Amino acid sequence: MEITQTYINELTYKITEACIEVHKILGPGLYENIYHQCLKKELHLLNIEYKSELTIPFNYKGEPIDCLVKCDFLIEDLIVLELKAVTEFFNIHRAQTMNYMNLLKVPKAILVNFNVTNLYHEGHETYISSHFKKLPKS
C-alpha cells in the first residue's frame, strides 16, 4: 500500500471518530489515563494499529540523551495522537505534540482534549509536518 495524503487524511478521520465515540460514552471530567485506556480498546475494535505510550529517542548534537519522552499513541507509524483532559489547550500542549511529530518524523499529529462538551468542534486540532507535504496526494 502506498502512503498518500488521502490515506493519512482518511486515517485521521477514523482516529477522530474513535475519540468521539469514547467521549460520547464517557463524557468530560475524567482523568486522561481513563480516556487513554478506553481509546486503546476503541482503536483495537477498529483494527487500527498503534503503539501506546511510545518512548521517543532523543538526541542532542548527535548524541543520545538519557531522558524519557513519550507520546500517547503512534498510529500506524504515521500519526502522533496526543491526549489531554484539560480546561483548554495551551501553546505548550501544541508545542509538545508538534515536537513529538517532528522527533518521530511522521506526517501528521492530532491533539485531543477530552475535557470539552463537544469534542468535534472544540476538542481537537491537527498538525501536518513537512513529511506530509512531500507525500503524493492520492
Image (spheres, rainbow, N blue to C red):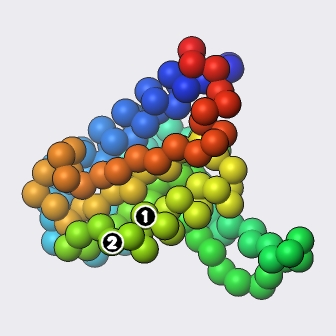
Q: Position of residue 65 (x, y in %)?
A: 79, 81
Q: Position of residue 10 (x, y in %)?
A: 44, 27
* Amino acid at dot 1: Arg
Disc 2 secondary structure class? loop
Quarter residue 70 falls in: bottom right
**In the displayed image of the protein, which residue is found farthest to the left?**
117
Q: Which residue is mark 1?
A: 94
Quarter residue 56 falls in: bottom right
Do residues under tags 1 and 2 come within 8 Å of each other at their CB atoms? yes
Q: Position of residue 42 (x, y in %)?
A: 36, 46
* Amino acid at dot 2: Phe
The residue sitting at 46% across, 30% down in the picture is 9
The residue sitting at 33% across, 71% down in the picture is 90
**Quadrant placement of the N terminus:** top right
**In the displayed image of the protein, which residue is found farthest to the top?**
138
Using residue 2 as the reference point, say whether residue 76 is left or right of it: left
Cα separation, mark 1 vs mark 2, equals 7 Å
Crowdedness of circle 2 by 10 Å Cα count: few (<14), some, many (20+)? few
The residue sitting at 42% across, 74% down in the picture is 92
Q: Residue 107 or 68: which is nearer the viewer?
A: 107
Using residue 95 as the reference point, say whether residue 115 is left or right of it: left
Q: Which residue is mark 2?
A: 90
Crowdedness of circle 1 by 10 Å Cα count: few (<14), some, many (20+)? some
Using residue 4 as the reference point, say whether residue 14 is left or right of it: left
